[in-house]
Image: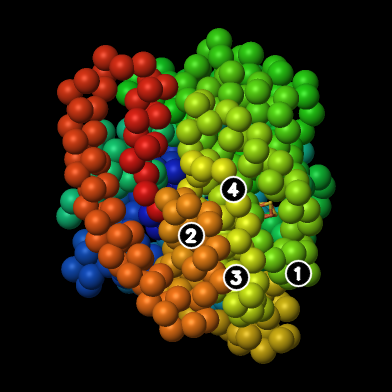
Amino acid sequence: MKTLLISTENTLVCFGVRMVSAILKHAGHRVDILFLPGEFNQVETREETRKIARWIGGFEPDLIGFSLMSSHMVRTVNLHRAIRETVQCPIIWGGIHPTLQPEECLEYADMVCMGEGEYPMLDLVGELAAGKQPGNIPNIWLKTGKTIRRTPLRERTADLDELPWPDHDAETHHIHFNGGIGPVGETAWRSFIPGFMETHYVMSSRGCPHNCTYCCNSALRKVGSGPYLRRRSPEHFVGEMEALKAKFPDLKGFVFMDDSFFYGDRIWFETFTELYRNRVNLPFFCWANPSAVTEPRIRLLAQAGLVGVHVGLESGSERIASEIYRRDVPREQFYQCMDILHRYRNQIVDVRVDVITDNPYETPDDVAATVEVLSRLKKPFWVGIVSLIFYPQTELAERAVRDGYISGSDKDLYNREFFHYQPTLLNRLMRTVPVTPGTLIRFFLKHRNVAWGRILFYLYYFGYFIAVRRQIKSLRRKATHLFLRFFGDRMDPNQVVITRVALIDF
Ligand code: B12
Ligand code: SF4
């Protein structure tokens, strides 16, 4: 029995398929993964689609499993249709989008997996391998003709330590890369690392202690029962990184993709940092909700190698933050978090503040409030600006349907790019904050509604920020890359990270 898992995600991080693959292999099943990285709005050409479908046909799988997020829907549908013409085996879809929109996905797939897929897939593969017709597997919804069989949802895996580490076994991994399908070699791996250097992505937890309305956590916590927020033991988590470090000797660091890495008790952090320092000792990055950032925790993590933190401000308008996003982080607490990070700026060199824009609930004054808050932060820091997308089933999406901002079946969702925000004056002003003195930002803010104020800003934006500064940055980047190519290996890994991070430009 051969199972082929397919990921349409744009990176090779793909925790979902790697976890499903790991548990199946652990139980002795044969599993391969095909990575089809691509921008979600660049559907494969007809020739590419045929080539991929032919390869899959030649592989002769007994079960195919697609993993997808909402933005991969269009590409997945295209590939699914082509594969259907060459392969007769059952096709299951899993991942965040099928979990949130199962009925829609069942218009194409034979089955969808709701929520966490390790045990449902183990049952499914077991039944198929035994020659049975799967019917009543919890979490696996089936389509027969026009009827959908909705099976009950099982409890989430309470103890994450019982799961194996994600599968990184390159021998059974394939990738569509440079016009062909082949093994995931060194060059392919490097080409798809999100970010800027050889990092591996890992997660110590599942779920989030917060419940922001625009985030899929607000929908996911309703799928299945049992505790939502769970964390692996420090031993299990560090063990995975130690094994990855041994397997990929060029590794320069780790990115902890936990929704909010900072939550949890002191003992977990003390044990983790000690083990990490002794057994891994590489720089790492993580995400944090500002309400969880405290000086003792930052000190501990900085000693263990923390070099980058992304914190969410999302909106500087208290009305939007609390009434629309349910992010009840008092502004003072946000400033405090940024102050703490600033005190560690020599070690934590990549501080990024994430902000959501293009929100129809926001007035220009709300956006101006965000710019104002950013203008008062001590530099250096970066701003990550994302355009609000109403992901299906989130509380905010449901509210936006009720309020008439979007229709119930918002197909536009599949073609919208998270990072492409609207080119308004306020968004552009926000972008310049990290390299512009706060007083100048507030000057532009104050005069943004008069013609001369706008002219002055655009002169600054296109003249200095885009033209002059970009040229200087590009020259600096080339010189630094050249330097690192020749001397990087002789440098302290921490210093390499710091040098590379300095090249990031949002
Ligand atoms: C880590 C992460 C990433 C990582 C890695 C993604 C990955 N797939 O591994 C990176 C940084 C690459 C990433 C990128 C993006 N992400 Co992201 N990401 C996450 C995060 C924080 C955790 C996901 C995760 O790995 N969880 C752990 C694993 C084990 O769970 P899982 O992936 O859900 O997989 C389980 C099940 O879904 C199921 N399953 C998964 N696949 C399959 C397949 C089969 C066959 C079966 C049976 C089961 C199955 O079993 C798995 C094991 O239990 C979530 C937040 C969240 N709370 O989920 C956001 C999240 C998934 N991301 C999101 C978004 C929007 C993005 C981006 C589109 C944003 C952007 N433009 O940059 C990009 C996509 C890039 C691209 N173009 O492909 C949204 C998705 C919303 C949606 N409805 O699609 C989320 C939910 C955050 C949010 N806004 O709420 N992301
Ligand atoms: S803190 Fe982040 S991950 Fe957690 S619910 Fe809010 S947006 Fe989602």
Residue toward you, 331 or 312: 331
Element under disc 4? loop
Identify residue type, mark 3: Val
Closest to the observer, 320 or 213: 320
Q: Is residue 150 visible?
A: no
Spatial CA distance of label 2 from label 4 is 13 Å
What quarter of the picture does the N terminus occupy? Answer: top left
Contact between marks 2 and 3 (CB within 8 A): the answer is no
To which residue does mark 1 refer? 319
Residue extending farthest to the top is 278
Mark 1 crowd level (few <14, some 14–19, many ≥20, 10 Å Cα): few
Q: Looking at numbered disc 1 in the image, what kind of residue is underneath it?
A: Arg
Residue 426, how many percent across, how many down?
50, 71
Q: Is residue 471 above or below residue 397?
A: above
Query: Where is residue 32 shown, x and y percent of the image?
Result: 39, 43
From the image, tell me which residue sits under label 3: 367
Residue lying at 78% horizontally and 53% vertically, measured from the top left = 330
What is the three-letter code of the residue carrying label 2?
Answer: Leu
Locate residue 263, reporting x and y percent: 74, 37
287 or 146, nearer to the observer: 287
Circle 4 is placed at which residue position? 377
The answer to whether residue 253 of the structure is visible from this angle is yes
State which tag comes first along the sequence, 2 or 4: 4
